[in-house]
Image (cartoon, helix red, strand yellow):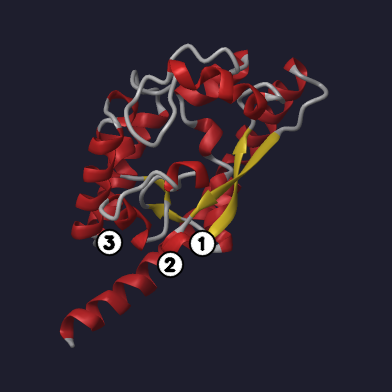
Amino acid sequence: MIEVEKRIVYSILKRSMDIFGALIGILVLLPLFVFVAICIKLEDKNGSVFFSQIRVGKNGKEFKMFKFRSMVTDAEARLEQLLKFNEVSGAMFKMKEDPRITNIGKFIRKTSIDELPQLLNVLLGDMSLVGPRPPIPREVKEYTEYDLQRLSVKPGCTGLWQVSARNSVGFTEMVELDIEYINRQSIYFDFFILLKTFVVLLGSKDAY
């Protein structure tokens, strides 16, 4: 009974922190949002500022996740040709010198600025400030029962994997870090990850 009450209290506090943090973040970062939007449009006038993609959230529920567009407009169509150059193992695609990334895209990815529109997803309740990386349906189809544990909580804008190792580890290691987070969930741990995230925002050498 005590454990159930703890989980309920944690859920309420976490959601409150998500709403408050997302609102403050959007207000404070609004000038940056405008600047990035202008830069994206200057490089590619025909493309959109934002990029949306179907991701898989808690308990397998799909939702539309928002990001600043960091790739050319036909990036998804080109993916099939690049899968053989995947540089990480498992159900995930990463390529350091991905030819689909625009010039401004390289900068906003390096600093994780491209992820900031996900604050809107936090307000909508599809994501949390802290949690596992939200996978795409194609990746989930390759998941084992063990990997599916990642979907037992809301995905996050940042998480233990993002602040610990980022792209320097493979899919298996990412799953282990996510499960570690799920097992250690607490408001204090979430605050720790959020604080550590600021280091990533200043530019991680593992980001691409």
Please, what is the three-letter code of the amino acid marked with disc 1? Answer: Lys
Residue 191 horizontal/vertical position (percent) = 29, 52
**Sequence-first tag of 2 and 1:** 2
Residue, disc 3: 187
Residue, disc 1: 61
| Observer-nearest of 48 and 93 | 93
Q: SS for tag 3? A: helix
Residue, disc 2: 15
Residue that extends furthest to the right in the rendered view of this protein: 46
Q: Residues within 10 Å of mark 2 (few under 14, many from 20)?
A: some
Q: SS for tag 2? A: helix
For the C terminus, the image quarter is top left
Report how far apart the C-alphas of labels 3 and 1 lie in the structure: 24 Å
**Sequence-first tag of 3 and 1:** 1
Please, what is the three-letter code of the amino acid marked with disc 3? Answer: Ile
Q: Residues within 10 Å of mark 3 (few under 14, many from 20)?
A: some
* Residue 207 appears in view: yes
Q: SS for tag 1? A: loop
| Observer-nearest of 197 and 136 | 136
20 vs 163, left or right, is right
Residue sitting at 73 percent across and 26 percent down?
38
